[in-house]
Amino acid sequence: MNTIEQQLWDYIDGNLDDSSKKAIEEKIESNAKIKSQYEDLLKLNLVFNALDLDEPSMSFNRNVMEIIALAPAPVAMKTKVDKKIIYSIGGFFVISLLALLGYVFYNANLKMPQFDLKVNFDFHLEKYITPTAIYAFLFADLVIGLIFLDQFLRKKAAQK
């Protein structure tokens, strides 16, 4: 719907303020196309007002609810799957995996290389464990402990 049609509907319905109403009246008087559109909308509005709305009977809701109550409730489908099919599909996958594993072992080079294990246990912990880190760790533990204590006490109070 374009804006002039919306403005004309608002004019017909009486939803415009005085300045907008005067502007629309001037447009209707000055433009023949808008005037013919306005007259068509007036006729359509009269037709709409002349229509009688059909109302359902008083027992409509009751009748609909009775029909719904009489309809059988849907049940879950109960299909039986043959266990042989499940076992054959599972067997196919197990045999495929075993064949793949056998192929990998057949083509694998199982020689273990010699490696020299030199482990350096000098971690320089004094760089990482500073007094600030210790205080931060203790503060976090304190907060967690207080939260735990609060929950524990609330459970005790709720039980009483």
Image: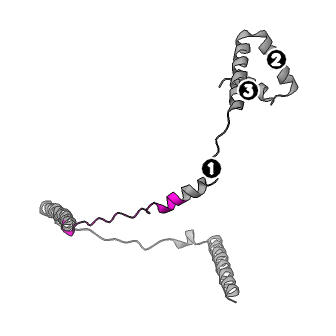
Quarter location, residue 157 = bottom right
Can you give x and y, in whole percent of width and height, for residue 73 in the image? Answer: 44, 63
What is the three-letter code of the residue carrying label 1?
Answer: Ser
Image vertical order of residue 120 relative to residue 61, above or below:
below
Q: CA distance from mark 3 to mark 1?
A: 33 Å
Res 32 → quadrant:
top right
Nearest the eye: 19 or 89: 19
Return the x and y of residue 59 as percentages of the image width and height. 61, 55
Residue located 69% across and 19% down the image = 40
Eye-nearest disc, 3 or 1: 1
Q: Main secondary structure of the magenta part?
A: loop
Residue 5 lies, with reference to residue 155, above or below; the image says: above
Instruction: State the quadrant of the N terminus.
Output: top right
Q: According to the image, label 1 marks what residue?
A: 57
Q: As drawn, is 32 to the left or to the right of 55?
A: right
Q: Which residue is mark 3?
A: 9
Q: Earlier in the sequence, mark 2 or mark 3?
A: 3
Query: For mark 2, what is the residue?
Result: 25
Q: Which label's residue is closer to the chain start, 1 or 2? A: 2
